Image (spheres, rainbow, N blue to C red):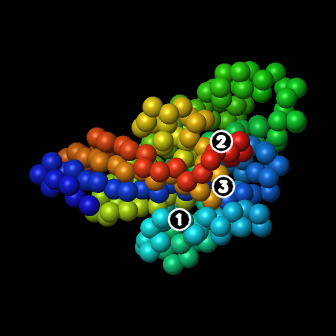
Amino acid sequence: MIVDVAENLYALDVAVIRHGRTALNERRCYTGEVDEDLSETGREDVRKAKAYTPFAGISRVYVTNKKRSQQTARILYPEAEQICVPELRELGFGDYEGLDYEHLKERADYCAWLDGGGLDAPPNGESRSDFLKRIRKGFLYVLYSEKDSREAVIAAHGGTVMAIVSMYTDKEFYDCMVEPGESCLIHVDFKIEDNGDVGISHFRLCDRLGTGSADR
């Protein structure tokens, strides 16, 4: 919805949804670049979430290049067109992909990664700073694409939710978790510069539909 045509200001309500569980999620394994289907438990997560998922009649949903994101969107918004934004995918965990704490706890590099708050890149993985830059690029792309809309939906990952909320609020990264299938509702005011760049002038976390979860 255009707020001020003269200033190229726009306002948009955005739902950022975490996908349902996969088999690796259920085992509390690191799942970033691994491309898994939703498990039956995961599908049930999403079916339950459908009762309070916002913007039911929306015509398009932004997803990542991972099946768990796309399948979640299909359950919640079966009639919507899916637009893939790979930049919104989960953090790449490198050598930790598909492994859980019990399999990693004796590794010195893993212990150092945990001690550093997960900021550095895991071996062959992605650093927090690079992840945030990537997510920001994908999020701004969605804002630009939906500049003439009132509402938008992103069906992505736990890390995506945490990145977007922590980047634009005073919340810490790990304070922004939501349960599988649940979402954060955000209101964004933004400006489009003459060169097409998007600048966020106001970001408000309106609602957080979930109590938090330890797995991603």
Q: Is residue 215 above or below residue 145?
A: above
Q: Residue at x 16, y 53 (%)?
A: 4
Residue 152 falls in which quadrant of the image? bottom left
Residue to which mark 1 is pinned: 53
Q: Nearer the viewer, residue 185 or 5?
A: 185
Tell me where residue 167 appears, x and y as whole percent: 46, 36
**Element type at marker 2?**
loop
Kindly identify the amino acid type of the residue bearing the numbered disc 3. Answer: Pro
Q: Secondary structure at mark 1?
A: loop
Query: Counting residues from the N terminus, which is met first, the one under dot 2 or under dot 1?
Result: 1
Task: Tell which of 78 and 132 is nearer to you.
Answer: 78
Query: Can you identify the residue that label 3 sits on?
Result: 180
Labels 3 and 2: the sequence-earlier one: 2
In this rendered view, identify the residue nearer to me: 123 or 17.
17
Residue 17 location, quadrant: bottom right
Q: Residue furthest left?
A: 6
Question: What is the tally of numbered marks visible in this picture?
Answer: 3
Name the mark on residue 92.
Answer: 2
Apparent side of residue 33 relative to residue 139 in the rendered image (left or right): right
**In the image, what residue type sits under mark 2?**
Gly
Q: Is residue 32 above or below residue 39?
A: above
Where residue 25 appears, as percent x and y from the top left, is 76, 51
